[in-house]
Amino acid sequence: MIKRLTLFVLLLYCFNANAQTTKYSPTADNLAARENFQDMKFGMFIHWGIYSQLGAGEWVMHDKNIPYNNYKRLADFFNPQAFNAKEWVAFAKRAGMKYITITSRHHDGFSMFATKFSPYNIVDATPYHKDPLMELAQECQKEGIELHFYYSLLDWGRPDYNFGSPIVNGKPVNGDWDSYIKFMKDQLTELITKYPAVKGIWFDGEWERHSVNWHFDEIYGLIHKLDPAIMIGNNHHLAPIDGEDFQMFEKDLPGNKTTGFNNEQSIGALPLETCETINGSWGFNINDRNYKSVKQIIHYLVNAAGRNANFLLNIGPMPNGKIQPEFTDTLTAVGAWMQKNGQSVYGTRGNIIPPQQWGVVTGKSKTLYVHILDMPEQPYIFLPLFKGKIEKVHVIADGSSVKYKQVPEGVFVYTNNLRTDPNDTIIQITTD
Ligand code: FHN
């Protein structure tokens, strides 16, 4: 009897040990998607929902203490007649962006897509009665733009989530956690199986309850079962966990810890992405005139690329579906800059040398791009650790050659008499 029991315990141990060591192993398609993701470099983040109508950002319900049942009335008059997927996608392309990440459901719990699993959605609960995410997905597919869906884990209104509840034994007290997890899985299945061109899921809101059991193994497993190539990222502000395909940083370049909410976040080995807003808000904010300049956006993009990260730049469209002219003007200028200089960003990788006071370096096979973002007073810059055999050094704007001196510790590049660019003077170094 004791022998049998020992055997049983041993088998049980082996089974558990096996379960614990079953690690996510990305498929070849997923690994290819990761490379492609890193090549794209520049994406458009879109926060758009019924909250846009109040013109005070996507946290308005929470920040202004609007009771959920009152807030829900916003759905009754959300009617974005001027929304045009063609215009949005054409605009993203004009800005030089290669992918779009849009809020399918934010913390207010409102689904901006047709879903069978909640009546609180744009088709059933608004006079608009159409599915803008389907139009966007179809247009993205047609135009070769990748589409990623932002999906909030946090929900301020659903009773099964029970926002504000203490968490006991991995579940909210008085919620119905199993029902909530099932609901998310059902919606994610819809998003992945019904919408064309979807290549990524961008989770957010985990930080609201770190101690709950989010069942990420099941959720990520389901997504990768439905489409193994889908890129999963989670804005939990921690190091990536098993099953994720990229790591994101919010309002911070990787490695900087300026926001306070990512103090524990270390940089892992996955592709990186950093997101920032074009003004100070994610959702439409009528009072936010804190617009970033063309130069600031180019610098953010180039600084991200130099640190091997994509840049996901957010805009909050207006409630009628239009994008405000301050954003379109700036991004059209950024797009024009990318038309001329995109070779030094798209398809490159960063972290070739550590970021320097004057700027960063990106590279692609045997070519390096030296981005001088802040021209130093002395007439040279120094690239430490540079070891390659140099064939040619020139300014990409006019092809003029640049003087340099290679020493065992790196290379001096002389910057006097260069044709400088107020945004970014880019010097190409070709090695053999
Ligand atoms: O609370 C959200 C916020 O509304 C927005 O969606 C950003 C985007 O990164 N993420 C959360 C804050 O971390």
Image: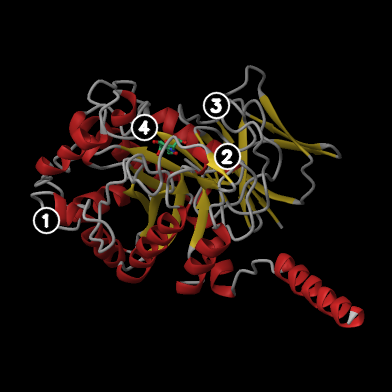
Residue 180 location, quadrant: bottom left
- Residue at the image point whose x is 80% and y is 47% from the top: 387
In the image, farthest residue toward the top: 377
Regarding residue 323, the answer to whether it shows in the image is no
Amino acid type, residue under disc 1 in the picture: His
Give yes or no for contact between labels 2 and 3 (Cβ–Cβ under 8 Å): no
Q: Which residue is mark 1?
A: 129
Give yes or no for contact between labels 2 and 4 (Cβ–Cβ under 8 Å): no
Give yes or no for contact between labels 4 and 1 (Cβ–Cβ under 8 Å): no
Q: Position of residue 208 (x, y in %)?
A: 49, 38
Amino acid type, residue under disc 4 in the picture: Ile
Nearest to N terminus: mark 4 or mark 1 = 1
Q: Which residue is mark 2?
A: 237
Q: Which residue is mark 3?
A: 259
In the depicted structure, whether residue 333 falls above or below residue 376: below
- 3 vs 1, front mark: 1
Q: CA distance from mark 2 to mark 4?
A: 21 Å
Q: CA distance from mark 2 to mark 3?
A: 11 Å
Amino acid type, residue under disc 2 in the picture: His
What SS does tag 3 mark?
A: loop
In the depicted structure, whether residue 175 falls above or below residue 195: above
What SS does tag 1 mark?
A: loop
Q: Position of residue 174 (x, y in %)?
A: 43, 44
